[in-house]
Image (spheres, coloured by chain):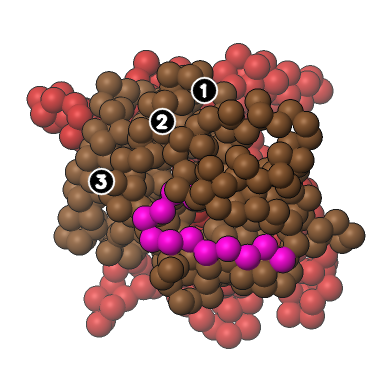
Amino acid sequence: MTDQTQTTPIVKGSAMSMNRVLGVGAFLLGVFVLVPVIINLTGRWDFYYTLTSVALLSVAAAGVWLTFYIGRINIGQGAYALTGGYVSAVLMTQYGVSFWLTLPLAGIFCALVSVLIGLPILRLRGVYFAMVTLVLTEVARLTALALPITNGAKGITSIPLPGELSILGLTIIPDFATLENPKLAFYLMAALLMVLTYLVLWRIVNSRLGHLCRSLQQNEELSASIGVNTAMLRVLSYAISSFFGGLAGAIFVAISQSIYPSSFVVQDSVNFMLYCFLGGLGYVFGPMLGTLLLYFGWDLLSVAKEYQLLIYSGALIALMLVLPNGILSLLDKKGGNK
Amino acid sequence: MNAILQIKGVTKRYGGLTANNDITFDVAPQEILSVIGPNGAGKSTLFKQIAGFVTPTTGEVIYKGTKISGLPPHKVARMGVVRTFQETTIFKSMTVRENVIVSHHLRSKASLLGFFFGTGQAKADEAEFGKSADDIIDFLGLQAIRNEIASNLPQGHLRALGMAIGLATQPEVILLDEPFAGMNHDETMRMVALVRRLRDERGLTVLLVEHDMPAVMKISDRIVCINFGEKIAEGTPAEIQANPRVIEAYLGSEDAAIGM
């Protein structure tokens, strides 16, 4: 943040950025080297699936977080994950498009749909917007049931694994079907996507775009009167949010090699929102941490059998009461570091 | 008079309620003009129509020969007509400086994508905004609270911050919504001096809505009085004070209410 580096002494500024570089380096090392090494040593290959899911869910949650950032409670990300999944599945199975091409197309399709939906509904605020988005997931599910191209309740199955990606004869990504360990490949892909997503999100938040989003979140009327095209900015943020949702959905489909109308339901949309809440709405990396903790927390609690849901929801309520600004607010010393 | 802003027969109806009825007056460049009237007279509605937040049912607002009524607020602001709000309307969880910097939006030359990638133009813009924000903060005497979070500020500072936000957009016409509300005598007098400086040092045209009659009488070049949505008088402070319809509108509280 320019304003911060300008007002803090230079020495402190460089120390901060040094810390930041170290932090990011450690994070990347952990995600791309440490995790595979540990899994290799312990032989818990099932963790790849869990961690891949966490990475993808946190990509979708990043989108939800961005809509929170403009002051809208978004409980409809499941709709875009489902849409993105179907776009990818239909393009691959019926038109033979390469997975790698369907990935951006799924995101773009979701972004376009969200512009059409967002134009009218983003005029709503607070609980009204939240209620409409809650319905969106259900609308998406029913649409998938009804449309001929989505094959109704039977869904689309036996979707091929991601093929080879080559540019000018140079193989960049090998065919997943030929790999001896596609789980690792999926994990690396999802982790890379997560890193890129949060890089984009971090950049948005720390550029003027983010400052304008904050102005929108805090006071839309004032924002308009200082010359911000609030309608455009709202739709833009929502489109970026849905783009992330579509991307995540498309990769989920590639992993499970199938998609059904119930692949993403209202529960998933609610979860995306909870990940953001728990991680912290004021912190870019909040949704990532929230996803990790909640997803793993739920898995770990399976030892509690029939009390799983009770303990889980009890813990959620307690967390929200004790840390209303999210888990990351624990790190927040006085002065509001981000 | 070569008007910078013309209000021409502006009428606003909400169903059966007529908030503004056929209001017409002109504003001269670098004039300080106050709009007064009892509660519910339609002053705020008029301001909203000038700033583009509400579209008049009939009639129009002309700024420098161009019709601005019906345009969205951000377009009106871009042309140079900016409304500030009552004190609570600031970006609460930003610091004073962040508030002012973000309000420079209109002046950015780089696109949002440019800001995302941090192009040279974007960096130049940010540097310029920072400098200009500091100028404005100095101009308004807010140096000491530059890095305070806005929600921690007392009334007087909030009002000044609201003005700083308005100034950051580089307006030619600034609409002040009750700039003196809730202030004691000293604070009011300081604010009156400040509004004068807006005009004298920054060349702004100032329109204000206000209830504090002594302050209005002191600061205004001219006054427009509205009652039940209609303009009932227009003139210099002395003319307004002597106008029987204005006195009547203020319901017998006569002298006290209009500051004599």
Q: Could you confirm whether marks 1 and 2 are on the same chain?
A: yes
Depth check: A321 or B54 in front?
B54
Disc 2 to disc 3, how far (Cα)? 15 Å
Chain whose colour in the figure is red: A
Image vertical order of residue B32 relative to residue A102, above or below: above
Determine which of the numbered discs, if any, sits on residue B201 in the image: 3
Towards the viewer: A248 or A223: A223
Q: Position of residue A94 (x, y in %)?
A: 63, 83
> Along the horizontal axis of the image, is A21 left or right of B97?
left
Quarter of the view holding residue A22: top left
Contact (Cβ within 8 Å) of mark 1 with mark 2: yes
**SS assignment at label 1:** loop
Residue furthest to the right in view is B16
* A220 magenta-colored: no
Q: Contact, CB < 8 Å: mark 1 with mark 3?
A: no
Colour seen for chain B: brown
Name the subunit of mark 3: B
Residue A16 vertical position relative to residue B108 in the rendered view, above or below: above
Q: Which numbered dot is residue B11?
A: none
Q: Which residues are magenta?
A: B22-36
